[in-house]
Image (cartoon, rainbow, N blue to C red):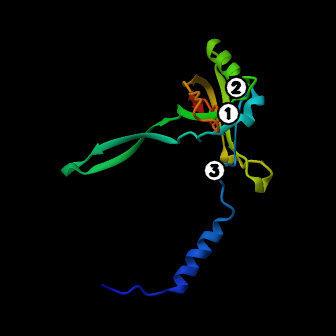
Amino acid sequence: MAATEGNKGFVKRLYNSEKAIGTKLKSNEFKFTIAGYEGLTAMFRTAQWPKTQREVIDEKGHGGVGIPEYGMLQNSGEIVVTAVENVRGDLLSALRGIIERAEKVNCTMEAAPESTEGESPEALVRNLEDCLLTSDAFDGSTDDTAALVKPSITITYGWAE
């Protein structure tokens, strides 16, 4: 078995590569907004940036070799967010109204880094258009006195910008 040898120069290059990245975006530095319902923004606790993808075409060449190709842009999809409810029921009231009226909404997922005072660079803003919302069932429990009510909301979007 070969002995591990130290290589301080290699480790320093790794360190400098990491440092060159700059301040990293933390997962809690985001803002999720439903247009027309901006008062709910502070309630969102988890959210997802939408996917960016195209269909993958698996083309087979001579000898059975695989040649992947990009297909059509898949610019619609689904994300899940969770939000905390207050004792007035603001979140569930808004959700119930949106869903019962079959209202399509537009949503925005964006970075809100402390280091930029919450201003998001354009690359970290995704606008989701023609969204349908569904609210999943959530639990109440007399055994869990330290948990908050956090409904899970599935958002199906028609277009991501």
Residue depicted at x 53% and y 42%: 52
Q: Residue at x 37, y 87 (%)?
A: 3
Q: Position of residue 80 (x, y in %)?
A: 56, 34
In x, y percent, where is residue 27? 63, 50
* Structural distance between the alpha carbons of marks 3 and 2: 23 Å
Q: Which residue is mark 2?
A: 91
Q: Nearer the viewer, mark 3 or mark 2?
A: 2
Tell me the crowding category of disc 1: few under 14, some 14 to 19, or many 20 or more residues within 10 angstroms, Cα based. Answer: some
Quarter of image, res 79: top right
Single out the mark in the foreground, 3 or 1. 1
Mark 2–mark 1 contact, CB under 8 Å?
Answer: yes
Please count the marks in the image.
3
Q: CA distance from mark 2 to mark 1?
A: 8 Å
The amino acid beneath tag 1 is Val
> For the view shown, which residue lies furthest in the left direction?
63
The image quarter containing residue 107 is top right
Task: Quickly name the residue at label 3.
Answer: 27
Instruction: Report the residue at 24% width, 51% height from top.
Output: 65
